[in-house]
Image (spheres, rainbow, N blue to C red):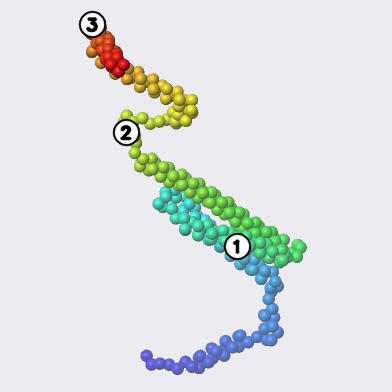
């Protein structure tokens, strides 16, 4: 198919468009004027923007709080992440402080842009309800954050107690037990031995026990070698003769010296 020149059609269409868009000067000036005042709509859009930012920040902080709660519920010692928990705790505290500041700024904005009496009562009630809703959500999040910190403290205390108990049991197992038959002194006996009177009584009692043991040990020997009356008299005669001989010898030596 051979090409056809449609330039004339294009120019005619362009002329018709210009004719339709051409308006009188008064109509153009009237079209530029807005139907409503720009003040209330701009303030309403600003309030919505501020409230939306606060709600978005609350949602993000709630997600961080949920993650912190999952980490704080872990009770095992080897699965604990103290560094991550500390970082999340610090970030959530900063977020809560920032949200308090933003809500206070939103309240100030509502008071500064309060509509005239009777004209915007519904708008004022709506803004107040939105501010109260944001404050309630922030308060609930703060209570949840407090509960998570308390749970973390309890788990840390329980973990510390388990560690101390494990170390105590390990040290007790390392100490050797006394051999069978070895006497272990009780604290009561140790306290009794520290008293002077009790110590003296114990010494005398031990001495009497040793004496009775020695006497019982010697008794069988005396029973095996009994002494008769005849052997006793012979031994006595020998002692007497010996003493007489010693006396005679001493007398002879005395007379010779004279």
Q: Counting residues from the N terminus, which is met first, the one under dot 1 or under dot 3? A: 1
Q: Which residue is mark 3?
A: 230
Q: Which residue is drawn at the image coordinates 23% and 8% (left, top)?
A: 234
**Residue 123 visible, this angle:** no
Q: Is residue 235 left or right of residue 170?
A: left
Q: Is residue 103 left or right of residue 206?
A: right
- How many callouts does the rendering have? 3
**Badge 1: few (under 14), some or many (20 or more) residues near its Cα, within 10 Å?**
some
* Quarter of the rendering occupied by the N terminus: bottom left
**Badge 2: few (under 14), some or many (20 or more) residues near its Cα, within 10 Å?**
few
Is disc 1 in contact with disc 3, using a CB cutoff of under 8 Å? no
Q: Which residue is mark 1?
A: 98
> Would you identify the image quadrant in which residue 126 lies?
bottom right
Which-is-in-front pick, marks 1 and 3? 3
Is disc 2 in contact with disc 3, using a CB cutoff of under 8 Å? no
Q: Is residue 145 left or right of residue 200?
A: right
Q: Which residue is mark 2?
A: 179
Measured as percent of width and height from the top left, residue 46 is found at 64, 68
**Badge 3: few (under 14), some or many (20 or more) residues near its Cα, within 10 Å?**
few
Which-is-in-front pick, marks 2 and 3? 3
Q: Counting residues from the N terminus, which is met first, the one under dot 1 or under dot 2? A: 1
- Single out the residue that lies furthest toward the top: 229
Q: Secondary structure at mark 2?
A: loop
Q: Is residue 182 left or right of residue 30?
A: left
Q: Is residue 98 above or below residue 145?
A: below
Q: Which residue is drawn at the image coordinates 38% and 43% (left, top)?
A: 170
């Amino acid at each position: 198919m051979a090409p056809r020149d449609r330039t004339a059609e294009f120019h005619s269409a362009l002329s018709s468009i210009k004719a339709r868009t051409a308006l009188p000067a008064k109509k153009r000036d009237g079209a530029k004027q807005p139907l409503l005042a720009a003040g209330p709509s701009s303030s309403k859009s600003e309030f919505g923007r501020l409230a939306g930012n606060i709600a978005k920040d609350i949602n993000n902080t709630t997600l961080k709080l949920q993650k912190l709660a999952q980490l704080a519920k872990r009770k095992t010692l080897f699965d604990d992440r103290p560094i991550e928990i500390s970082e999340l705790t610090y970030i959530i505290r900063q977020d809560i402080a920032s949200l308090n500041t933003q809500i206070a700024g939103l309240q100030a904005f509502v008071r500064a842009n309060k509509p005239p009496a009777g004209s915007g009562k519904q708008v004022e009630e709506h803004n107040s309800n939105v501010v109260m809703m944001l404050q309630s959500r922030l308060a609930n999040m703060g209570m949840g954050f407090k509960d998570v910190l308390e749970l973390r403290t309890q788990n840390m205390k329980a973990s510390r107690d388990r560690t101390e108990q494990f170390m105590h049991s390990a040290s007790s197992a390392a100490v050797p037990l006394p051999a069978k038959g070895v006497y272990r002194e009780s604290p009561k006996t140790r306290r009794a031995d520290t008293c002077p009177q009790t110590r003296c009584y114990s010494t005398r009692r031990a001495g009497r026990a040793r004496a009775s043991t020695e006497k019982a040990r010697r008794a069988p020997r005396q029973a095996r070698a009994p002494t008769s009356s005849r052997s006793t008299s012979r031994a006595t005669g020998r002692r007497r003769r010996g003493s007489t001989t010693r006396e005679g010898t001493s007398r002879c030596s005395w007379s010779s010296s004279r």
